[in-house]
Amino acid sequence: MPGIEDYTALVNAELEKAVPENGGIVCDAMRYSLQNGGKRIRPVLALEFCRVCGGDIHSALPFACAVEMIHTYSLIHDDLPCMDDDGLRRGKPSCHVRYGEAFALLAGDALLTLAFKTLMTAPLPPERRAEACLLLSDAAGYSGMVGGQELDLLNEGKKVTAEALRETDALKTGELIRAACLLGCIAAGADQKQREAAAIYAENIGLAFQITDDILDVTGSTETLGKPAGSDEENGKSTYVSLLGLEKSKELAAELTQRAVASLYVFGAEGGFLSELAYALIQRKN
């Protein structure tokens, strides 16, 4: 069974080849952001769900890289002054700080379009590639991640309910995580029961992931996080910590993780890696 280091190495090697060196400023900015570390959680999920559903992880690698490209583009745009205005990303200057706002904007746009080209190169039947394309475009667009970013901007400076916050995060963070899990299922030709389990797992770890982010924004340091700590409060954002308190937020993240793990019964012993990953995500320090 591959470990997280094996999956990360596979993904990093593919991403290294995805954008040409010396291709101009936009390509340099794309490579800078793609190779700026990161946990690679989404591509790891895509590859592991492909494996536990009986598929070949190498055939799912373009799907995994595509979802990571979209995640990276979203971070470039999130950091822009017109959005969250963050100067640090993973301990390094944000893309717009390093290359300027205009080139950062173009780099994000280029990664979004490259994601779909990459997805369509998967050595899989055309109907699986088409299904994956529809899934990922919905998850990334106005009815998914972008819709969540819209709500997030509208929520700034306002006191929102926990339910409204949950709706925002289900779109902004959760949809791309759900897409990653289901992309692995699509690559493997998974059955309905496996897909339903993957969706439940994704929904719960996605929300637990965001709650943990909110906790770390309060308890972590800029050095540990690799981005400005305390930025949520500074930007007037409602978070799970501000609404529920620190301890209740930790309890909720743990409860959601248990639900995610419970959904893996479908995969039997093969679900061990995904179970360990779910717990690791709420115990992380950055």
Image: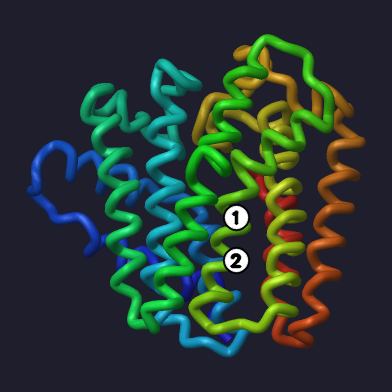
Q: Name the residue under label 2.
A: 181
Q: In this view, does 25 lie to the left or right of 18?
A: left
How crowded pointer 2 is (Cα within 10 Å; few <14, some 14-19, many 20+) is rated as many
Residue at the location (23% across, 39% down)? 29
Q: Position of residue 157 (x, y in %)?
A: 67, 10
Residue at 90% over, 35% down: 247
Determine the secondary structure under disc 1: helix
Residue 2's mark? none
Question: What colour scheme does the image use?
Answer: rainbow
The residue shown at (43%, 55%) is: 68
| Circles 2, 1 touching at the beta carbon (< 8 Å) | yes
Label 1 environment density (alpha carbons within 10 Å; few <14, some 14–19, many ≥20): many
Q: Where is residue 57 in the image (x, y as percent from the top left)?
A: 46, 81
| Placement of 65 over or under 60, stated as above or below | above
Q: Is residue 22 left or right of residue 110?
A: left
Q: Where is residue 220 in the image (x, y as percent from the top left)?
A: 66, 32
Q: Inspect the image, locate mark 2, and give the three-letter code of the amino acid beneath it.
A: Cys
Residue 214 in view of the camera: yes
Tell me which corner region of the image, top left, top right, bottom left or bottom right, holds residue 242.
top right
Q: Which amino acid does label 1 sit on?
A: Ile
Q: In this view, does 162 lie above or below 53?
A: above
Which residue occupies the foreground of this view, 100 or 263?
263
Residue at 38% x, 82% y: name it.
Answer: 124
Residue lying farthest to the top in this orientation: 157
Name the spot of residue 284 as percent of width and height, x first: 67, 50
Q: Is 112 left, or right, of 173 in this rendering?
A: left
Where residue 275 sits, quadrant-wise, is bottom right
SS at badge 2: helix
Distance between the alpha carbons at the discs numbered 2 and 1: 6 Å
Question: Which dot marks residue 177?
Answer: 1
Quarter in which the N terminus is drawn: bottom right
Task: Report the quarter where the C terminus lies.
Answer: top right
